[in-house]
Image (spheres, rainbow, N blue to C red):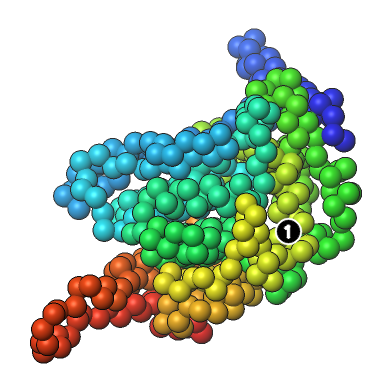
Amino acid sequence: MKYMATYDLMETARNTNEWLGATARALASYPAFSMSMSPLVNLTAAWGEVTERTFGRMVAKPDWGIRSIAGDDGQDHLVDVKPVVERPFGDLIHFSVRRRAPMKRKIMLVTPMSGHYATLLRPTVSSLLPDADVYVTDWHNARDIPVSAGKFDVEDYTLYLVEFMRHLGPDTHVIAVCQPVPLTLAAAAYLAAEDPAAQPRSLTLMGGPVDPDAAATEVTDFGRRVTMGQLEQWAIQRVGFKYKGAGRLVYPGLLQLQSFISMNGERHAKAFNDQIMRVARGEASDHDAHNRFYDEYLAVMDMTAEFYLSTVERIFKNREIARNDFVVAGKKVDFGAITDIAVKIVEGSNDDISAPGQCLAALKLLTNLPDSKKASHLEDGAGHYGIFAGKSWRLNIRPLVLNFIDANSAAPVSAAPASAAPAQPAPAAKSPTIKLATSQGSASA
């Protein structure tokens, strides 16, 4: 399927459905039809409105929509989204709050590159902004990146994270959600060995597949059943002539969306039928619950073929992270190099994407990290989305994460250099010690 024709065929079908929706909405909205007593007129207009919006959202990048936050001074502070590191495949962006002094907490939020835009974590960003300076990895849609920009695979992804962490400095606290968890851990280990002065203070790893074999899910089962040849034949296409990345091999967002929807087809069909009836009755609005959810859910982005295939092969099939056998730019990443970075694991008991145990496996890799700097939390009743954006995040997990960050914000105490020792004997002075505790106290918390 590695042809432009198949990619353009999907885009043609999407565009046609968007046009049909717009046409039905416009035709059924003519004043002349208002004299008709048939309910089909309103239903046709409603169907057209929902259809046009649905298919139009599939190729539009959502806006962050975070305009302002309330400050401690009782005033609203405007928020600007500013890129601080710009690269072809992704930027590091800063949510700069006007008229606010730098915060004690500096958080780098690593977002997934798994089909949706970084804006999927909008609720997470909004909840952290009042209490921290927030930086976010904003990955680009592969269809818009020219072939001349080169490849982008799991090693490149890891090196991007290394660069972002270096830029922010050692007083940074990193939170990784879902797919980037194992690569974030690898980036931290890479820094710990190559540039320990730039390593972050803490890592919070949430619902990611560090060891996919630790607990089976539909995702891991699929990874075992399908060969790499089959996956490349079924999933990979070339970007069509409509976009700047024409000719680039990608895993198309529209193909990913088809897989997402097929997993819960009946539920999605009911949701759209109900929305059509609400529009026909005049009960829907531009930002109602349906539109808020599906405007984000339907907005999908292409992944580079090499990133998708290397993720499946190296993370899921070969388990290179779980076996501590991951190589980046010709250098083996040793997770034993992490000795000072506090690490917290967060999992949801009902997570059907990264089941409990897959992320917790990270702590076993950190053989030289003291137990006092390890922590874990299993949120009872939380699913995959809930641990970083739902009720569980708002009520339970967010406070735990912030407490963990505060408990590990002090710089590690380093031994004084020999040249600094006094020439004459003097009474030994007690140097201050800093206890690096975690919000849970131990890895079994």
User: 204 and 200: which one is in front?
Assistant: 200
Residue 26 at x, y percent in the picture: 65, 16
User: 364 and 193: which one is in front?
Assistant: 193
Q: Is residue 52 above or below residue 105?
A: above
Instruction: Give the residue pinned by disc 1.
Output: 314
Badge 1 amino acid: Arg
**Relative to residue 26, is residue 174 drawn left or right?**
left
Residue ID at (44%, 59%): 195
Residue 38 at x, y percent in the picture: 72, 24
Callout 1: SS = helix
Q: In which quarter of the image is the N terminus?
A: top right
Asked whether residue 312 is in view, the answer is yes
Q: For mark 1, does the 10 Å Cα neighbourhood hold few (<14), some (14 to 19), or many (20 or more) residues?
A: some
Residue 187 at x, y percent in the picture: 53, 58
Residue 139 at x, y percent in the picture: 55, 41
Q: Is residue 233 above or below residue 286?
A: below
Asked whether residue 45 is in view, the answer is no
Q: Is residue 20 above or below residue 346?
A: above
**Relative to residue 389, is residue 149 drawn left or right?**
right
Residue ID at (12%, 87%): 425
